[in-house]
Image (tube, grey):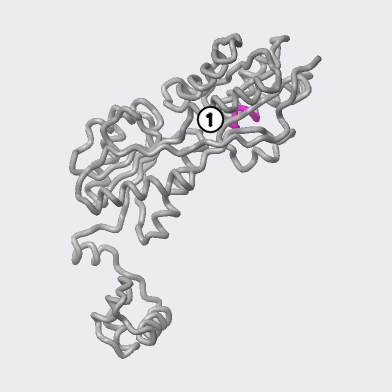
Amino acid sequence: MTDVGHLANVSYETVSRVLHGHPGVKPATRARVLSAIEQLGYKPNTAARALVTGKSRTLGIVVIDTPDWSSLSTLYGIERGARSLDYYTSVVSLDMHKSSIREATDHLIEQSVAGVLVIAPIDIANDALAEFPETLPVVAIEGDPAAKICVVMVDQVAGARAATEHLLDARHETVFHLAGPLDWRQSRERITGWREALEAAGAEVTKPISGDWSARSGYEIGRTLARIPDMTAIFVANDQMALGLMRALGERGRRVPEDVSLVGFDDIPEAAYFSPPLTTVHQDFAEVGRASLELLLKQIDSGTQSDEHRVIRAELIVRQSCGPPPA
């Protein structure tokens, strides 16, 4: 910063005011300082800044290592949002054990992170979150809505209900369900929305079958489902499993949507390029990331934990994988 000041012919304090966006700097002076910063390739030292201000510019992120695309999309949304706010991120990817979640959090605390975001869609993560220190700003993404910590979640129940109602509106007598793992909150809530829609319509509620989110499990379960002759509609808990299911149906000679209609969940970028393009439920991961950062930074600024909850709307995206049942 001293070198920048010498080149721009201003004081160290003026350089600091420009870097912090202080309004009391003349436009011509600000332009000289910014030009000197660019010419010298200056990058602020975040560690030194934290020592001076007592505030870290690093946020910790704990993400569970799973094949679920939504967790990675949420992670990317948070990282981009943090960068736009001049925060850095420290990411720890974990296996699915309560002890590893606590160890990861302790590791992040040792790094003096300002707060922690936990992408916590599974039960074991919610158990660990209940033991977090009360002084630590934290947001649980897809956490337990009954938790007494800050939670941001997508309305999974409403999204699943809309997906099932779309198939029922196409005059299918009932809708089968290929669910996700039952230790995931999203899986259980999507089952709830599916069941509520069927019960409201007076349709038969079949037993859901659980996969592991992967296209492989969708394919393997699909080989069984494809043999059910009166099955004409399936709501699939994520798009990857829907892709595997489509292949299994095709191998059995059952066409989508002429013989079987499908609706997925997540709206992955490839969903529009399935054959046929997949009707699915869109989750706004960018909004999840923005809301999560907003609530975490609010806690950091106030110095107190919050139990505020934020629910993000899910949206049905209609494409060509649904139609009326075969005559």
Q: Which residue lies furthest to the right in this view?
A: 327
Place residue 20 in its image quadrant: bottom left
Rendering quarter of residue 268: top right
- Location of residue 138 with respect to 233 vertically, above or below: below
**Residues in magenta, as a range:** 239-243
Q: Residue at 32% x, 41% y: name it.
A: 139
Q: Nearer the viewer, residue 205 or 109?
A: 205
Dominant secondary structure, magenta: helix
The x and y percentages for residue 175 are: 63, 17
Q: Quadrant of the N terminus?
A: bottom left
Q: Where is residue 208 in the image (x, y as percent from the top left)?
A: 54, 15
Q: In the drawing, does residue 114 fall left or right of residue 180?
A: left
Number of other residues with Cα within 10 Å of mark 1, as a class: few under 14, some 14 to 19, many 20 or more: many
Whether residue 180 is situated above or below residue 92 in the rendered picture: above
Residue 35 picture location, percent across and down: 41, 83
> Helix, strand, or loop for circle 1?
helix
Check the picture and name the quadrant holding the C terminus: top right
Query: Can you identify the residue that label 1 sits on?
Result: 159
User: Is residue 241 one of those drawn in magenta?
Assistant: yes
Instruction: Name the residue furthest bottom.
Output: 9
How many numbered discs, if any? 1
Q: Which residue is drawn at 70% across and 18% down?
A: 171
| Image: 136 above or below 12 | above
Residue type at tag 1: Gly
Is 70 situated left or right of 124 in this image? right
Q: What residue is rendered at 65% in x and 20% in y?
A: 168
Q: x%, y% of residue 279?
A: 66, 33
Query: In the depicted view, which residue is nearer to us: 40 or 325?
Result: 325
